[in-house]
Image: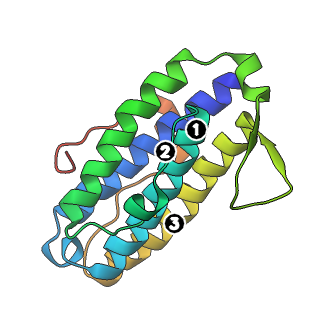
Amino acid sequence: MLAMIRDLVQHKNYANAILLNAILGHEQASADAELRGLLHHVILANRFWLSLFLDQPFDVNRESQVPPSMRDVAGLYRQTYDRELDWIRGINDSDLQRALTTPFIPDRTFSLGEAAMQVCLHSHGHRSQCATRLRILGGEPPPMDFILWLKDRACAEWSQAG
């Protein structure tokens, strides 16, 4: 299971980076408040769960503030990618069984593996919404399919986004 979680996390970061690069490369999309808010929602959730994985504090009030620009949102993705990459490289199979609790879903415990899967699936779902919004604004969403990523297993490239 660890290999699959690592692949999904790496794909998530790759897909996030190429989507952000496409958005930042499109003037109207990079200025779109709806896209900025949606992308911030995704990274907010990702940062929350990562803080649980790392057993670090999370300032929900500070983190919930939507940054003023798409470039600032992209900076949060890049910063989170760096932290997440260190984390995912250092875990082992038994770490995936560690129990996590969150005040946002009371009376329920999740394994770290389940939570990592949630982060990947949550991001995936919202990336499709962002791709649709980018297309509505006249942009061209990049190919972000997991199966295509598996061919080369490309690393996230933050050319525009960080």
Q: Which residue is mark 1?
A: 8
| SS at circle 2 | helix
C-alpha gap between disc 3 and disc 2: 11 Å
Q: Is residue 153 visible?
A: no
| SS at circle 3 | helix
Camera-side residue of 111 and 107: 107
Give the residue at x 16% y 62%.
Answer: 25
Please tell me in which quadrant of the rendered image residue 96 appears. Answer: top right
Please tell me in which quadrant of the rendered image residue 27 appears. Answer: bottom left
Indicate the position of residue 156 as horizontal and vertical percent values.
Answer: 34, 37
| SS at circle 1 | helix
Q: Three-letter amino acid code at disc 2?
A: Lys
Indicate the position of residue 29 as horizontal and vertical percent values.
Answer: 23, 75
C-alpha gap between disc 3 and disc 1: 15 Å
Count the labels in the image: 3
Do residues under tags 2 and 1 come within 8 Å of each other at their CB atoms? yes
Q: Three-letter amino acid code at disc 1?
A: Leu
Give the residue at x 44% y 55%.
Answer: 43
Q: Is residue 71 above or below residue 5?
A: below
Q: Is residue 9 above or below residue 62?
A: above
Q: Three-letter amino acid code at disc 3?
A: His
C-alpha gap between disc 2 and disc 1: 6 Å
Q: Which residue is mark 2?
A: 12
Q: Which residue is mark 3?
A: 126
Camera-side residue of 38 and 101: 101
